[in-house]
């Protein structure tokens, strides 16, 4: 009896593996797919970083300028109608103004010469002087918007960081430019802020035109920037 007759036969197709050409084709297709996935990841990552930087700059402007605007609107506040308050120094890059502040619990003007808030605070009609200007708050090579109370530089604090440029433009009641502090009724702020970190895939070649017509830039660096012009009505200036 021939026992080989009952042994199953394995076809030629069942014994065949992958050829070198097939392996190379599979590797090429896989490489293309991985390249596409990596490119999509890079694009999404770059978009995320860009949006993060833009949001950071916008938030910085919003927080700092909001504080400046709120206080600038109080320039000239004087419920006693003494006529001694208002904008006292109107410069293109800084502004100083006074207001009555006899309800803040601070001895702003030291009118009684005792330097003590506990006994000299909040005299009737007490004035507070506030200055806003650019300065390098942290000695890190970039400028920030600073707020100073009175003449004491120790009170100066940064309210907005990474501000490249700041301009004040002063208008009278007719909307005309004025250099007379007593005639100022509104102030136009031009603010240019930049991101904290550079984006090496981006080059900033833009220029920015201020309310006065001055041109800032181009900087030709890797920092993203945001620019705003805001008009503030000085509602207490009469």
Image: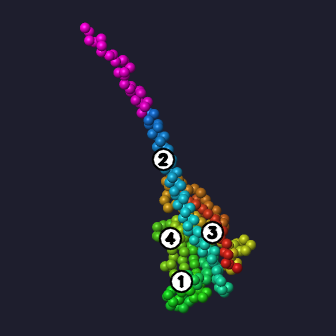
Reading the chain from its start, which is encountered first: label 4 or label 2? 2
Q: Secondary structure at mark 2?
A: helix
Q: Residue 105: which quarter of the image?
A: bottom right
Q: Residue 226: which quarter of the image?
A: bottom right
Reading the chain from its start, which is encountered first: label 1 or label 4? 1
Which disc number belongs to residue 136? 4
Q: Nearer the viewer, mark 4 or mark 3?
A: 3
Bounds of the magenta segment:
1-27
Q: Is residue 50 visible?
A: yes
Judge whether 67 appears above or below 49 on screen: below
Q: Distance from label 4 to label 3 (Cα)?
A: 19 Å
Q: Distance from label 2 to label 1 (Cα)?
A: 55 Å
Q: Position of residue 93 (x, y in %)?
A: 59, 72
Q: Which residue is identified by label 1?
A: 105
Q: Distance from label 3 to label 1 (Cα)?
A: 30 Å
Reading the chain from its start, which is encountered first: label 3 or label 1? 1
- Rendered residue at 58%/84% (across/down): 102
Reading the chain from its start, which is encountered first: label 4 or label 3? 4
Q: Distance from label 1 to label 4 (Cα)?
A: 29 Å
**Residue 194 vs residue 185: left or right?**
left
Q: Residues within 10 Å of mark 1 (few under 14, many from 20)?
A: few
Q: Nearer the viewer, mark 1 or mark 4?
A: 1
Q: Which residue is identified by label 3?
A: 189
Judge whether 125 appears above or below 200 on screen: below
Does the magenta segment cover residue 3?
Answer: yes
Q: Nearer the viewer, mark 4 or mark 2?
A: 2
Q: Which residue is identified by label 2?
A: 42
Q: Residue furthest right?
A: 174
Q: Secondary structure at mark 3?
A: strand
**Residue 17 vs residue 107: left or right?**
left
Does the magenta segment cover residue 186?
Answer: no
């Amino acid at each position: 009896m021939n026992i080989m007759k009952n042994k199953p036969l394995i076809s030629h197709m069942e014994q065949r593996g992958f050829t070198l050409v097939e392996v190379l084709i599979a590797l090429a297709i896989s490489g293309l797919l991985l390249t596409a996935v990596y490119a999509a990841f890079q694009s999404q990552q770059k978009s995320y970083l860009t949006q993060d930087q833009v949001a950071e700059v916008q938030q910085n402007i919003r927080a700092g300028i909001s504080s400046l605007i709120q206080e600038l609107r109080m320039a000239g506040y004087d419920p006693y109608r003494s006529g001694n308050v208002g904008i006292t120094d109107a410069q293109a890059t800084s502004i100083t103004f006074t207001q009555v502040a006899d309800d803040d619990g601070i001895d702003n003007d030291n009118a009684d010469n005792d330097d003590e808030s506990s006994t000299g605070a909040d005299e009737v009609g007490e004035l507070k002087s506030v200055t806003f200007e650019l300065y390098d708050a942290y000695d890190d090579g970039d400028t920030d918007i600073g707020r100073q109370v009175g003449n004491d530089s120790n009170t100066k604090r940064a309210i907005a960081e990474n501000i490249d440029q700041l301009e004040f433009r002063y208008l009278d009641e007719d909307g005309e430019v004025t250099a007379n502090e007593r005639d100022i009724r509104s102030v136009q702020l031009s603010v240019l802020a930049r991101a904290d970190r550079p984006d090496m895939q981006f080059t900033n070649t833009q220029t920015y035109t201020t309310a006065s017509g001055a041109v800032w830039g181009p900087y030709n660096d890797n920092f993203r920037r945001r620019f705003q012009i805001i008009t503030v009505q000085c509602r207490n200036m009469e």
